[in-house]
Structures are given as C-alpha cells and as structure tokens.
C-alpha cells in the first residue's frame, strides 16, 4: 500500500463533506427519535467522526439499537451501510464503532462514538 498524500486528503475530504451533507439530517432525526444528539468532530479529511450524546431523560439504553437506526437512516440515502460488530472502549466511558458507507463507487468510514447513557438513579447530586 502506498503512502497517503496531501492530494488523498483533499479528494477524500471533498467526498466526505458531500456525503455528510446528504446523510447528517436523516441521521440526526433517527438519533433524536432515540434520545440522542449527533455532532461532527474532526477535519473530515480521512474519515467522518461523529459523536452521539444522550440528550433526553429517556434514551435508548442499547447503543447497538442506536447504530442500527443510524445505519438505516444512512441506507435510506445511499442504499448501503454496514458496521463492524465490535465496540472499542474510549476515554470517559465512550464507546466507538465504525460504519462503512458506500455511495456510488466511493466509500467512507464513519467513526461513531457514543457517550454513555446514565440512568437517573445512577446520577450523583
């Protein structure tokens, strides 16, 4: 595999930005239905970094269900989205999973981080 060049980042970044413009609104609607807000983080030059933050008092507690809903929203636009089964542990209780998106003959990696949902009874005063 060859080394990545600045041109690679420019081309992938342009693709990522265009794709994000298409998929972010339906992803945000799907996340909102599950009690989460979605925000974008990072440069978009290599991949699309997203963070799902619990936003309502009652959120879907299963992050896999959130991912299935988000993947469905993406599929509604692009026709194809898969995700890896494994979650990766991150700092502060955050977990991450990569979603693979195809649009035409191009692909993008969506790195989704999910902040933990803390039920009311576990919150400290």
Image: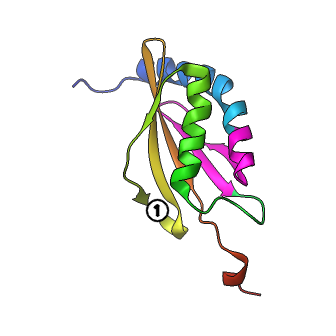
Q: In terms of image quadrants, where is residue 21?
A: top right
Q: Nearer the viewer, residue 85 or 50?
A: 85
Q: Residue 53, how many percent across, how many down?
A: 67, 56
Q: Which residues are magenta?
A: 28-53
Q: Residue placed at 43% from the left, 34% from the top?
A: 82
Q: Is residue 34 magenta?
A: yes
Q: Residue 20, how many percent across, how many down?
A: 62, 28
Give neighbour class at mark 1: few <14, some 14-19, many 20+ (Cα, 10 Å): few
Tell me if I can see residue 43 in this picture: no
Query: Is residue 117 rendered to the left or right of residue 67?
Result: right
Q: Identify whether 10 is placed above or below 117.
A: above
Furthest toward the bottom, the residue is 125
Query: Is residue 74 rendered to the left or right of residue 98?
Result: right
Quarter containing the C terminus: bottom right
Tell me if I can see residue 67 in this picture: yes
Query: Is residue 65 rendered to the left or right of residue 89?
Result: right
Furthest toward the left, the residue is 1
Q: Which residue is mark 1?
A: 90
Q: Residue placed at 59% from the left, 49% from the top?
A: 66
Q: In terms of image quadrants, where is residue 50?
A: top right
Q: Residue placed at 59% from the left, 40% from the top?
A: 70
Q: Identify whether 10 is placed above or below 94.
A: above
Query: Which secondary structure lies at badge 1?
Result: loop
Q: Residue placed at 57% from the left, 56% from the top?
A: 114
Q: Is residue 43 magenta?
A: yes
Quarter containing the N terminus: top left
Q: Nearer the viewer, residue 89 or 67?
A: 67
Q: Residue 44, how many percent across, how many down?
A: 55, 32
């Amino acid at each position: 595999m060859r080394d990545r060049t600045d041109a690679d980042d420019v081309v992938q970044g342009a693709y990522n930005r265009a794709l994000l413009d298409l998929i972010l609104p339906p992803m945000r609607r799907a996340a909102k239905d599950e009690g989460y807000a979605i925000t974008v983080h990072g440069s978009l030059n290599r991949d699309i970094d997203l963070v799902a933050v619990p936003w309502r008092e009652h959120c879907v507690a299963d992050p896999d269900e959130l991912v299935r809903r988000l993947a469905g929203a993406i599929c509604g636009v692009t026709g194809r989205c898969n995700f890896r089964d494994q979650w990766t542990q991150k700092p502060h209780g955050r977990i991450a999973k990569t979603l693979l998106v195809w649009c035409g003959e191009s692909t993008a990696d969506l790195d989704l981080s999910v902040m933990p949902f803390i039920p009311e009874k576990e919150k400290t005063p």
